Image: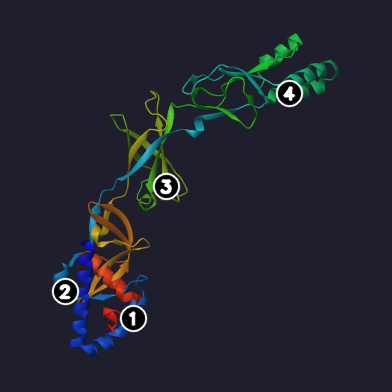
Amino acid sequence: MKKMIVLLAVALLACGEKARQEEHPADHAAAKPSADHSAHGGLPEGHAEVEIPSDRQQVIGLKLAPAERTRFDATVRASATVQADEKREAHVHSKLMGYVRKLHVNAVGQKVKKGQALYSIYSQELLVAQQEYLRAKKFSTDLADAARERLRLWDIPEDQIRAIEETGTPVEAIVVRAPISGTVIEKSIVQGHFVEPDMMLYLIADLSQVWVIAEVYEYELGRVDRKGTATIQIEGLADPITAKIDYVYPTVDQQSRTVKVRMVVENKKGLLRPGNFATVELPGAGGELLTVPDEAVIDTGFRRVVYVASGEGRFRPVEVEVGRRVGGRAEIRKGISEGDQVVVSAQFLVDSESRLRATGPGPGHGGH
């Protein structure tokens, strides 16, 4: 039904144009070069200027509205997630190849203290290194020092090295300890498995302080006060949290066209968990922006176009750059000026006629 209405309206536009040409053939002949020029000179590709007599405008219900300045809220709103503070994370790798003899920490979510035993490992290369150290102590101080340093670089605790020296016997397995206090976020180690240096066995994070990462659309980023304080509402928590903006990331996500904005939040009670969703209100610079009604903007998939009344029943397609959309109005950053009258009703009919005129001979090109 909608398609039939569009076709009927376009037909009415065509009939009206044909009648005008028959009444004023000389005018049409004179106007033809101008129409051809406007279809290719400064207008969006695939569009042409349209002329619609006032009686036809009434038939199709064409209405206009001015481009005008509208006061927008200064706040920039964005979706966000809670993440562990990367500066408070520790990746635990084995510096030795060997077999996991025993797991002391065996669950994600388990809290650990710095120096707490995580696992013990049996390593043939460690056993050989200890034997070399004990032999070197008997014959060469320099060789012994080098062998001892090798053990230290493998994170063998000083007390274990002293125990080897005192007993003269290598230990079969050494205990690997937590490098920081925190919570086990990831664990890939299993008792009895063979591990190598390139394997991450644990990820430990200190969650007493976390990051909230907001994703702000690039066209809104310029309004954000980068030294301001954000209001954060975490899903599942009743009260909002405030935090200073800590960092604005330097890259734009190619898919979402957003930029990450980071806030650092104290989390002593552990109420914020990595993965929590949040909404963030960022302080911004408000003011009046040039806007048109949302319906005036036609998105072709390649560009955004509005139709501006240019007098005497003529409507000119103009490509525009659109910013924020709030309260049924669209910010126009580029393309038109304050006071321009834009089509807000029957705009798709006007667009259809514009495309017909631009593609070749038709109602606007003599109808031959």
Reply above or below: 348 against 277: below
Q: Looking at the image, is mark 4 or mark 3 earlier in the sequence?
A: 4
Q: Which element carries disc 3, helix, strand or loop?
A: strand
> Which label belongs to residue 56?
2
Q: Is residue 325 above or below residue 267?
A: below
Q: Which residue is mark 3?
A: 259
Residue extending farthest to the top is 167
- Asked whether disc 4 touches disc 3, contact meaning CB atoms under 8 Å apart, the reply is no
Residue 36 shows which numbered tag? 1
Report crowding for label 1: few under 14, some 14 to 19, many 20 or more residues within 10 A (C-alpha): some
Which badge, 3 or 1, comes first in the chain's sequence? 1
Q: Which image quarter is the C terminus in?
A: bottom left
Q: Earlier in the sequence, mark 2 or mark 3?
A: 2
State which tag comes first along the sequence, 1 or 4: 1
Residue 339 makes an appearance in the image: no
The image position of residue 367, as x and y in percent, is 27, 82
The residue carrying mark 4 is: 125
